[in-house]
Image: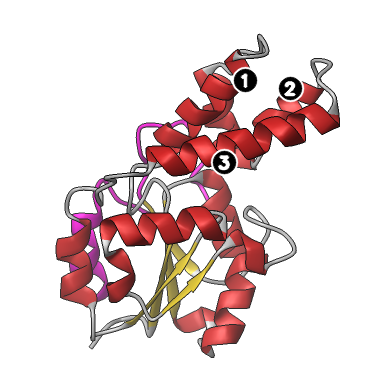
């Protein structure tokens, strides 16, 4: 029997390597107007939830123009998701956990992008429930996504585990009262994970900790 009744997984950077694609799409679009998004800035943005388009507005780009560019970026990113595969080890671990514990995804991904990711990777079959950023008033690092997921799935925070790869994800999960294990990736290793209950080096470590 699992040590937890439910496990809530982040998506981007944990199940699929999409954060680098999102950066590439954003950088590509903003380069067309002469705005460079440094990788170090983007890594920090992943931790606190800053928008690259707010970065552009602060450099004189109008809100109307940034909204247009955001739409172009979203289309470009969706194109880049074609042929996407799960991160190594993810499918094996999900197969080990499936049927032994309730599993859900809680993601800051837009619904359209998330649906593309699920279609390309085939990961949806392993999960009982999914929450995207379109369904909550505030995204991570606020607790809203996890609170909504708990309410909709009738799970209790005290019996639930969150698995996250970013500082803002950990902040969100802990603010909602969940236990949280962090698995930093190449873009998030510099984040503050002091609030996490455990820091793992790989998703492959998960079964022995929860079963």
Q: Could you classify mark 3 by the number of other residues whose Cα lies within 10 Å: few (under 14), some (14-19), or many (20 or more)?
A: some
Q: CA distance from mark 3 to mark 1?
A: 12 Å
Q: Quadrant of residue 1?
A: bottom left
Can you tell which mark lies on residue 194? none
Residue annotated with mark 2: 56
Please tell me which residue is depicted at 65% across the width and 39% down the height of the picture.
71
Could you say whether the residue bearing mark 2 is in a helix, strand or loop? helix
Between label 1 and label 2, give the one nearer the viewer: 1
Where does the magenta region start and end? Answer: 183-211
Measured as percent of width and height from the top left, residue 106 is found at 50, 65
Q: Are marks 1 and 2 in contact (CB under 8 Å)?
A: yes
Name which of mark 3 and mark 2 comes first in the sequence: 2
Q: Quadrant of residue 30?
A: top right
Figure check: 67 above or below 92: above
Q: Are marks 3 and 2 in contact (CB under 8 Å)?
A: no
Q: Could you classify mark 2 by the number of other residues whose Cα lies within 10 Å: few (under 14), some (14-19), or many (20 or more)?
A: many
Can you tell which mark lies on residue 74? 3
Name the residue nearer the viewer: 90 or 34: 34
Q: Quadrant of residue 35?
A: top right
Residue annotated with mark 1: 30
Quadrant of the snapshot with the C terminus: bottom left
Q: Is residue 201 magenta?
A: yes
Measured as percent of width and height from the top left, residue 189 is found at 41, 34
Q: CA distance from mark 1 to mark 2?
A: 8 Å
Please tell me which residue is depicted at 46% across the width and 58% down the height of the picture.
114
């Amino acid at each position: 029997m699992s040590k937890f009744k439910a496990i809530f997984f982040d998506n981007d950077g944990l199940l699929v390597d999409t954060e680098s694609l999102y950066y590439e799409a954003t950088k590509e679009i903003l380069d067309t107007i002469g705005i460079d998004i440094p990788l170090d800035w983007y890594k920090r943005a992943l931790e606190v939830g800053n928008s690259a388009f707010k970065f552009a507005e602060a450099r004189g780009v109008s809100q109307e123009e940034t909204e247009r560019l955001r739409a172009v970026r979203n289309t470009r990113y969706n194109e880049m998701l074609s042929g996407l595969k799960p991160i190594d080890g993810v499918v094996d671990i999900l197969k080990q956990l499936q049927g032994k514990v309730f599993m859900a995804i809680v993601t800051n991904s837009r619904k359209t992008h998330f649906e593309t990711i699920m279609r390309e990777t085939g990961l949806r079959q392993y999960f009982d429930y999914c929450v995207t950023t379109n369904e909550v008033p505030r995204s991570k690092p606020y607790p809203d996504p996890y609170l909504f997921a708990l309410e909709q799935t009738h799970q209790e925070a005290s019996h639930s585990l969150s698995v996250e790869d970013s500082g803002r994800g950990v902040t969100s999960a802990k603010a909602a009262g969940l236990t949280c294990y962090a698995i930093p990736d190449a873009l998030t290793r510099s984040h503050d994970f002091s609030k996490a209950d455990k820091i793992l080096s790989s998703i492959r470590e998960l079964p022995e900790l929860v079963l």
